Image (spheres, helix red, strand yellow):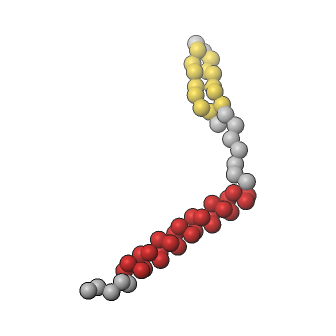
């Protein structure tokens, strides 16, 4: 993954970095948390919209 490019005359120097992906169990935790946040939003939206109006 290139971070920075330097031109020096005819040459180009590149600063690079290595990246490591998430582990499978981290992905599952992220998906579970995202789904729970989405479900909470649905529940709150439903609760607010179905509240009796005085």
Q: Residue at x 62, y 33 (%)?
A: 2
Q: Is residue 16 above or below residue 23?
A: above
Q: Is residue 49 above or below residue 36?
A: below
> Residue 40's x, y, as percent?
50, 72
> Residue 15's x, y, as percent?
63, 27
Taking the image as shown, residue 52 lies to the left or right of residue 47, namely left
Q: Where's the N terminus, which quadrant?
A: top right
Toward the viewer: 7 or 50? 50
Taking the image as shown, residue 28 lies to the left or right of residue 43, namely right
Toward the viewer: 20 or 40? 40
Which quadrant holds residue 52? Answer: bottom left
> Residue 21's x, y, as percent?
70, 48
Q: Residue furthest top?
A: 9
Taking the image as shown, residue 33 lies to the left or right of residue 19, namely left
Toward the viewer: 20 or 51? 51
Q: Residue at x 58, y 28 (%)?
A: 4
Q: Is residue 20 above or below residue 14?
A: below
């Amino acid at each position: 993954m290139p971070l920075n490019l330097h031109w020096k005359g005819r040459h180009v120097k590149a600063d690079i970095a290595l990246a490591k992906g998430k582990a499978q169990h981290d992905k599952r935790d992220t998906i579970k948390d995202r789904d729970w946040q989405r479900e909470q939003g649905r529940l709150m939206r439903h609760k607010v919209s179905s509240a009796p109006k005085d």
